Image (spheres, coloured by chain):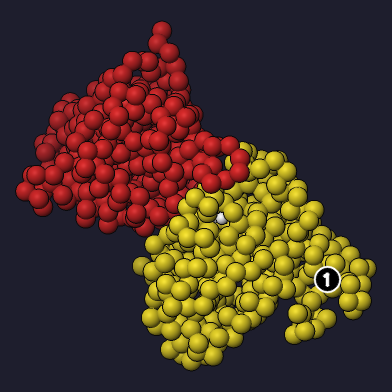
Amino acid sequence: MNTELNRESLLKAYRMMRTIREFEERVHTDFATGEIPGFVHLYAGEEASATGVCMHLSGNDYIASTHRGHGHCIAKGVDPAGMMAEIWGKETGTCKGKGGSMHIADLSKGMLGANGIVGGGGPLICGTALAAKLRGDKTVGVCFFGDGASNQGTILEAMNLATVWNLPAIFVAENNGYAETTSPNYSVACENIADRAAAFGMPGVIVDGFDFFAVYEAAGEAVKRAREGGGPTLIEVKVSRYYGHFEGDQQKYRAEGEVQKLRNEKDCLMQFRRHVTADGDISAAELDAIDAEVLAMIDDSVVRAKADPKPGPEELLTDVYVSY
Amino acid sequence: MARKITYQQAINEALDQEMSRDPSVIVMGEDNAGGEGSPGEMDAWGGVLGVTKGLYHKHPGRVLDTPISESAFIGAAIGAACNGLRPVAELMFVDFMGVCFDQIFNQAAKFRYMFGGKAETPVVIRTMYGAGFRAAAQHSQCLYSLFTHVPGLKVVVPSNPYDAKGLLIESIRDNDPVIFFENKVLYTMEGEVPEEIYTVPFGEAAILREGDDVTIVALGRMVNMAQEAAEALQKDGIHCEIIDPRTTSPLDEETILESVEKTGRLVVVDEANPRCSMASDIAGLVVRKAFGALKAPIEQVTAPHVPPPFSDVLEDLYVPNAAKIERAVTRVAEYR
Ligand SMILES: Cc1ncc(C[n+]2csc(CCOP(=O)(O)OP(=O)(O)O)c2C)c(N)n1
Ligand SMILES: [Mg+2]
């Protein structure tokens, strides 16, 4: 199954997923102290999705993300230290402290932004894909969106447009079972979000979002098709989130023990570790070493984020226009 | 002494009482109950900040959670209003109006006029606005002036719990489309609110403080800041008159003009961005209709012409506050 992935790539994927997990666990802990301002939506539990997709992308490919964007950012190569500083509202943040958790972006990395507007990314990715197509540079655009966002007109219109223009776009529906409190069992009229692909004339596939290799494989096919001019794909990633909709959510709409069971039985990092160490090619000690490095890196990013200065008052009025 | 409840409870009570009184009133919005299709509790949230909590169980079948499809459900509320219901639809944060604005400003707002006076569209769209939550550029805007600009819409901006309840009941009973703006920072504000049902009429400003020196017209959360400023200015011998328009459409021009006729000096306080805003609208009104009375240039205390920033230090600079109002009032009062 993972034949295309050499040792180096496997270690890279593991490090990426571990970085996302550690980043999110740390933001969760620090948010509880009251020091982190604003709304924070954590991606813990969904790491295999961003990683399985972004392992196929280079810096010239674009992604559009959501309010739950930290994982997508890290997987697309945005600097975690800059992200941490952004979440803490510091001048050294990815967006100088002007955007915060919901708006982390790094266009130099092909990361078109987390998004505060549900469904905001779909049309934008059609645009980056159109530019790529007209230039003929074989790059692609990936729109990540949630099960809730799958009901937004912008997403449905974007999927139609992507087929009409035969764009190199990939739509990744991260179905984590909830939009705030609401289940797709209620909000999505058909059985699976992927079923809608047929209506837009594109292939639709469903993958287990706890299984990195399943996501990697499906995304590989979609990215290849897009690069070769074969048009868009819809991938539904069935997954779950380990924390509330946002930090502070009491989660009374969830089943008792739901998350613990997933952590024990399905966790993407646990499965990945079991899988790659079983082959004997990669040792548990190597993965432990990555864990320790990532932990130290995240610790360091928090220490720096806390110590860094907040933006100066002059920043309030800058960056509204390029020229005015 | 009357009972004290919060702004948020006042809104909940208005919805509850109107739903009990009139079976045609329904409530809809994203997670307005919460938990649809999910394995845990129903009414798990009662809206993102809990404002509609409890209505789901009290009024079975009349609190509808919606998919994240604002065009569809806001439009459906408008259609239902054309067919005998009185829907109160929640557009969670007003910043989300972008995805459903057509249904509001080309559909609901225009029916009555386009159809030659034959349509009635008694829909209420409740929505949160304002900075202060460190929620950044897409969750903190004050967009009431965009709606005020559109003929056919009524726009309500309550500044305290009493008005929130009375104006919401008025909104539900009104036969035109009403956009009801709730300031998210004010949700926890307490105030005296009668248990009985009452209404506060549209187009009637409240004079919250009388004074002869400077008129302050303030909206929403800014009303409280203006009161704080006026309190401090009183000690310096500057007596402010504070006017809360309460609705921006219709706008009670008369109360504003009468006050400026008396004081000759005006400060408008508006949390929104300054261009094409309520601040500029009210300033323009006074220049046109009370020019002769003016003894000083009008001052506007508003957010700057930038989107709401995330970082707390920047957001605190962005939002008007009592100190900025005091300085503006002092400049206007001292102008000779
Ligand atoms: C246009 C718009 N409507 C509503 C919201 C409020 N909101 C933010 S996240 C969210 C739920 C999104 O659910 P989903 O797409 O499944 O993503 P998830 O949170 O599960 O990652 C809602 C309703 C918003 N930000 N933008
Ligand atoms: Mg979801």
Residue at x-position 38% and y-position 46%: B91
Q: Residue furthest top?
A: B1
Q: Which residue is denoted by mark 1 in the rendering?
A: A275
Point out the image quarter for the C terminus of chain B.
top left
- Crowding around mark 1 (Cα neighbors within 10 Å: few <14, some 14 to 19, many 20+) is some
Q: Amino acid at mark 1?
A: His
Location of residue B22 by image quarter: top left
* A190 is higher (above) or lower (below) than A323: above
User: Tag 1's secondary structure?
Assistant: helix
Q: Horizontally, is B71 left or right of A212 in the view?
A: left
Q: Is mark 1 within 8 Å of ligand 1?
A: no
Location of residue B4 by image quarter: top left
What color does chain B have in the rendering? red
Which chain corresponds to the colour yellow?
A
Q: Is residue A96 visible?
A: no
Residue at x-position 45% and y-position 63%: A120
B67 or B210: nearer the eye? B67
Mark 1 belongs to which subunit?
A
Q: Residue furthest front?
A: A191
Q: Residue B86 in the image: state x and y as whole percent.
A: 27, 36
Q: Residue B138 in the image: state x and y as whole percent.
A: 45, 54
Q: Residue A157 in the image: state x and y as whole percent.
A: 39, 69
Residue at x-position 28% and y-position 33%: B24
Q: Is residue B52 visible?
A: yes
B250 or B278: nearer the eye? B250
Q: Residue furthest left?
A: B116
* A131 is higher (above) or lower (below) than B132: below
Residue at x-position 70% and y-position 66%: A48
